Image (cartoon, coloured by chain):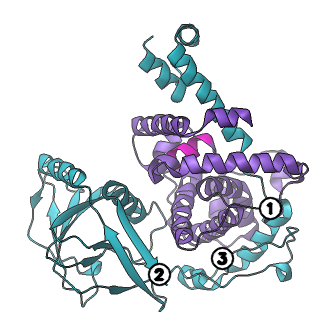
């Protein structure tokens, strides 16, 4: 076996592994033996730090708090149910809970957030993704306004692009003119903030819906792109994943302050 | 009740049907069945017991409210885990703005882990070191690794939960191991 194969098999075991050949290789190869030793160490460390299971009293307390809320519509409920805080002894009695002020999750909450942010987009990642798009052969269809992406007062515009070969795969090209800064946005809104003077492209891969978003910021002043989708998804939340992906790719930094 | 008599677990699908019709005992059984998965996942992502319980609460609330949308294609566990993953991510983002320290015996636990203070201290120290290494992984890779290492999901199950090919899952686990093993200070850990 080659070292690469051995390490892959150690890291991600499969049913096809030849344990004898693996053991023989590790016994003779100091580099693979060291890797195997660290892998065992990681497994032990993981086991040693397993989360302590909450007591049955804590679970009962959580359920006692949760159960009455289940027939209430979700958006109202998320705003009114306080986070679960068990008492020190894990008692389940509701009166012994120490409810913290409820944390709003809905964007409809009137509380406003001032978003301040910095973005340093990884140029190479953008170029790479742009090349990827070109390679996929996207062609713009008739421009279609995607009004729900924006507030009615937003000067941003969007056009829909479709992939001929794969109708389910879509692109939204969003053009954002310069705007003033700082910008006040509602809590829970997903925004990308550009402070960069140069036009940039960010691609948001949207995994489960087989779609993809392109955001193109233009202008010399900081701009804010509001990407908050309407409604809430309880399946995979593409926006979280997509935003996380962009954040990783672009070294995006968004700070929000109440 | 039938479960007690027959020893056969009621299938998720049956419980989901009953829960949709407002059957509290079915809801409670689903909660009991998946609360631990949700908690352990959230705990590994957030490193804090209280935050993990918040995630369980929010996730279950979302899940029960959206149970009518569950189409059964991916299996209830995978569907629930997706909700938990999103919720934990959301709670984590909020926590970045209002950081908490590491746990210091905030909630009631099963007694076995609490008996020896020295052991607890040692365990906490190890956990902080592991959490620091985990923090250096990207969210996506960390999620995959936690599903694999903590919840014991198969590559196929993770692929379904994260909606990626199995090969991608394996690459992510490999990458996570490489990075974690490289980040951890083994001399220090072995000396403890």
Residue drawn at x 70%, y 45% as measured from the top left = B126
Q: Mark 2 and mark 1 in contact? Answer it, CB < 8 Å.
A: no
Q: Which disc is residue A257 wearing? A: 2
Spatial separation of the CA atoms under disc 3 and disc 2:
31 Å
Callout 1: SS: loop
Q: Chain of mark 2?
A: A
Say above or below: B83 vs A185: above
Q: Mark 1 and mark 3 in contact? Answer it, CB < 8 Å.
A: no
Q: Chain of mark 3?
A: A
Q: Are marks 3 and 2 on the same chain?
A: yes
Q: Are marks 2 and 1 on the same chain?
A: no
**Residue A32 location, x and y as percent?**
52, 18
Q: Main secondary structure of the magenta part?
A: helix
Decide if residue B65 is on the left or right side of residue A196: right
Q: Which chain is cyan?
A: A
Spatial separation of the CA atoms under disc 1 and disc 3:
29 Å
Residue A205 position by quadrant: bottom left
Query: Badge 3 is on which residue?
Result: A70
Residue A141 position by quadrant: bottom left
Q: Indicate the colour of chain B.
A: purple
Callout 1 crowding tier (Cα within 10 Å): few <14, some 14–19, many ≥20: few
Q: Quadrant of the N terminus of chain B?
A: bottom right
Spatial separation of the CA atoms under disc 2 and disc 1:
29 Å
Query: Badge 1 is on which residue?
Result: B105
Residue drawn at x 72%, y 33% as measured from the top left = B191
């Amino acid at each position: 076996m080659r070292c690469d194969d051995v390490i892959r098999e150690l890291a991600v075991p499969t049913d096809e592994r030849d344990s004898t050949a693996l053991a023989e290789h590790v016994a003779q190869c100091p580099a693979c033996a060291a890797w195997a030793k660290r892998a065992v160490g990681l497994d032990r460390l993981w086991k040693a730090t397993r989360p302590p299971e909450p007591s049955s009293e804590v679970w009962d307390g959580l359920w006692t708090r949760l159960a009455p809320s289940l027939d209430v519509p979700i958006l109202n409920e998320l705003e009114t149910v306080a986070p679960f805080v068990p008492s020190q002894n894990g008692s389940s009695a509701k009166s012994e809970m120490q409810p913290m002020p409820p944390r709003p999750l809905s964007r409809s909450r009137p509380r406003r957030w001032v978003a301040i942010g910095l973005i340093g987009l990884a140029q190479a990642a953008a170029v790479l993704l742009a090349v990827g798009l070109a390679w996929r052969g996207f062609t713009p269809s008739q421009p279609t306004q995607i009004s729900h992406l924006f507030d009615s007062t937003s000067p941003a515009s969007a056009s829909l692009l479709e992939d001929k070969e794969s109708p389910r795969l879509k692109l939204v090209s969003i053009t954002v003119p310069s705007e003033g800064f700082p910008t006040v946005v509602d809590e829970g809104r997903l925004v990308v903030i550009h402070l960069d003077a140069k036009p940039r492209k960010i691609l948001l891969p949207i995994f489960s819906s087989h779609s993809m978003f392109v955001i193109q910021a233009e202008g010399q002043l900081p701009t804010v792109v509001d990407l908050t989708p309407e409604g809430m998804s309880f399946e995979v939340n593409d926006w979280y994943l997509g935003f996380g992906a962009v954040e990783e790719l672009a070294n995006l930094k968004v700070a929000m302050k109440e | 009740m039938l479960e007690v008599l027959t020893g056969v677990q009621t299938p998720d699908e049956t419980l989901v049907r009953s829960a949709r019709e407002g059957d509290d005992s079915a809801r409670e059984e689903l909660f009991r069945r998946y609360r631990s998965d949700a908690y352990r996942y959230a705990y590994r992502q957030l490193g804090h017991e209280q935050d993990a319980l918040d995630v369980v609460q929010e996730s279950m609330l979302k899940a029960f409210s959206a149970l009518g949308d569950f189409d059964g294609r991916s299996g209830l566990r995978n569907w629930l885990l997706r909700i938990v993953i999103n919720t934990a991510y959301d709670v984590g983002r909020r926590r970045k703005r209002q950081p908490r320290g590491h746990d210091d015996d905030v909630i009631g636990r099963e007694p076995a882990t609490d008996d020896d203070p020295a052991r607890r201290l040692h365990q906490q120290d190890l956990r902080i070191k592991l959490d620091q290494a985990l923090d250096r992984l990207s969210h996506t890779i960390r999620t995959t690794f936690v599903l694999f290492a903590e919840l014991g999901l198969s590559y196929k199950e993770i692929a379904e939960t994260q909606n990626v090919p199995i090969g991608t899952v394996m690459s992510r686990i490999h990458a996570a191991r490489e990075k974690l093993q490289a980040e951890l200070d083994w001399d220090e850990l072995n000396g403890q």
